Image (spheres, rainbow, N blue to C red):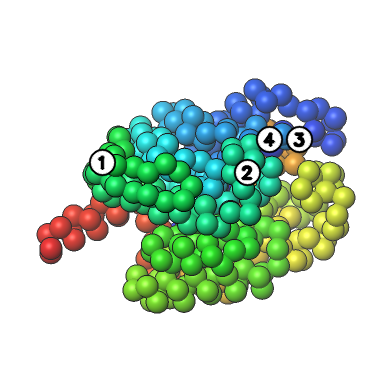
Amino acid sequence: MQFGIFSVGDVTTDPTTGVTPSEHERIKAMVKIALKAEEVGLDVFAVGEHHNPPFAAPANPTVLLSNIAARTEKIVLSTSTTLITTNDPVRLAEDYAMLQHLADGRLDLMMGRGNTGPVYPWFGKDIREGIPLAVENYALLHQLWREEVVDWQGKFRTPLQGFTSTPRPLDGVPPFVWHGSIRSPEIAEQAAYYGDGFFANHIFWPTSHFQQLIAFYRQRFEHYGHGKADQAIVGLGGQAFIRPKSQDAWNEFRPYFDNAPVYGHGPSLEDFTEQTPLTVGSPQEVIDKTLTFREHFGDYQRQLFLMDHAGLPLKTVLEQLDLLGEEVVPVLRKELDAKRPAHVPDAPTHESLKAAREAQAVTA
């Protein structure tokens, strides 16, 4: 079971001080947050791709993740998400293979369509073609990483003849891919078809909606012969604000929640925590609620938390990570690993994928 954090890189005014960090400060803060995540024993740091304010998250996450890769040793670096719709698959194949080498294999990707409508015309794409773009572009990326010489023709880009993407994936093992979605069964179908992971970032919508998406993915994963439904590779998003005492957490987080750029001035904090995975409270309360995710979705492989949004100052975020890494994750890891049946796999890593490839070559 992997535990980690994901950042959307929002530049938001702190509602308690009126201070707005600069883009420079926010970008530097994300690096410090990633380093802290490794320090406290988390497994994954992921960063999103945005091309518009109020986000400072990089248009090309490989730049930020390369910096972090050079300063870390263990933590897996990921995206949350990479826009498979508006990026050229050839460039994605090259950039992320390069990052995979620089990170010595500590890399995977989460592919998504994106949740900002205007990004499509900015890159010459039509949002009405979002699903077909995601399907075609990923099919090409998948092929580029697995075939030395590619001949390809599709609808959305110029054909390729005798093309070789360089550098080649490290050890001949492409980065593992998660397909992230909050609403599209077509993306769950795509993940299942390739035997890839499905990441349900269920931070806004009701649990019942994501139960249906994940159940569909598991069913189709088995249909395509990748294993039994409960062996499908599932990741979940979540949010938490933690203090040693529950009431302190509620009092401190409330102004940030009330003014957050996404859900501020909407549902009350009480209603939102009741209806979504957001947990505000003590370490034990975060543990208890997170353990219910298994009851809703079955055994899963990756849990990421959003911890650095809504204008929270860096000092507070680092304190959150101390509590998450020292008091919450060790208990969750022990409890969830103990409950997971032996036939349900761990999250794929470069090492496990390389070993599987070598074993397959021996038996071939």
Residue receiving disc 3: 12
Question: Mark 4 or mark 3, which is nearer to you?
Answer: 4
Residue receiving disc 1: 162
Alpha carbon distance from label 1 to label 4: 36 Å
146 relative position to 109: left or right: left
User: What type is the residue that disc 2 sits on?
Assistant: Tyr
Residue 362 or 38: which is nearer the viewer? 362
- Ranked by sequence position, the earlier of labels 1 and 3 is 3
Percent position of residue 263, x then y? 79, 51
User: What type is the residue that disc 3 sits on?
Assistant: Thr
Secondary structure at badge 4 equals loop
Q: Is residue 319 visible?
A: no
Residue 63 in the image: above or below residue 171: above
- Ranked by sequence position, the earlier of labels 4 and 3 is 3
Percent position of residue 193, x then y? 41, 66
User: What type is the residue that disc 4 sits on?
Assistant: Asn
Residue 163 or 324: which is nearer the viewer? 163
Alpha carbon distance from label 4 to label 2: 12 Å
Question: Mark 4 or mark 2, which is nearer to you?
Answer: 2
Alpha carbon distance from label 3 to label 2: 24 Å
Residue receiving disc 4: 52
For the image shown, how many numbered marks are present on the structure?
Answer: 4
How many C-alpha atoms fall within 10 Å of the one at disc 2: few (<14), some, or many (≥20)?
Answer: some
Residue receiving disc 2: 120
Question: Mark 1 or mark 4, which is nearer to you?
Answer: 1
How many C-alpha atoms fall within 10 Å of the one at disc 4: few (<14), some, or many (≥20)?
Answer: some
- Which residue is depicted at the point 70% across and 50% down? 241
- Ranked by sequence position, the earlier of labels 3 and 2 is 3
- Ranked by sequence position, the earlier of labels 4 and 2 is 4
Q: Quadrant of residue 36?
A: top right
- Which residue is depicted at the point 29% across and 42% down? 161
Question: Mark 3 or mark 2, which is nearer to you?
Answer: 2
